[in-house]
Image: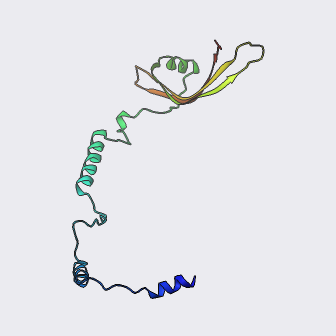
Amino acid sequence: MNDIENELRKLRPTRPSNGLPIRIGMALADAGKLRDDVITPHRFRVNWVGLGLGVAAAAAFLIVARLDVHPPAATRHPVASNSTAPPRDRASEVSSYQAIGLTQVVYSKRNEGLLFPPGSATPVRRLRTTRHETMRWEDPHTGARLQVSYPAEEVTLIPVSGQ
């Protein structure tokens, strides 16, 4: 170990080349300037064109959609009314409604695996479907509309054969 330490103590740095001080001076002078090969991060800038197009698109949508929260009094339909008519007449009014639509939105359809029902020789696969149904009716005479929405769940058993 002493030999290595002695060898290291004998080492002396070499003299710098003649051009080194000149190159250091030039580098210090150029340090304040921006160069093309140096990548600088972009600062936050507002893209006025994109912002203007977004506002214009939103305004166009609102003009086309014409969201009217409060319809005029002439087009309002009474939600409920006080009537002294017998229930039989009300039932005949409900029968004049005609179905105009049914919408089913399936939220999930899961395969719950195989089941072996008791007393059955073949297994069955259970599929569970969860959906939301909306039914719409309209009275052609008065123009009144009725809409009912409810969740629905269906379980289907499919026989599975091993052949």
- 116 relative position to 142: left or right: right
Residue 75 pos. (x, y %): 36, 33
For the point 52% across and 85% down, the residue is 5
Nearest to the observer: residue 44 or residue 137? 44
Nearest to the observer: residue 79 or residue 114? 114
Say how many tags the image has.
0
- 13 relative position to 105: left or right: left
Residue 33 pos. (x, y %): 22, 75
Nearest to the observer: residue 60 or residue 47? 47
Q: In this view, does 36 lie above or below 25?
A: above
- Quarter of the image for the N terminus: give it: bottom right
Q: In this view, does 28 lie above or below 127?
A: below
Nearest to the observer: residue 64 or residue 12? 12
- 16 relative position to 149: left or right: left
Judged from this view, the residue extending furthest toward the right is 119
- Quarter of the image for the C terminus: give it: top right
Q: How is the image coloured?
A: rainbow
- 141 relative position to 20: left or right: right
Residue 27 pos. (x, y %): 24, 79
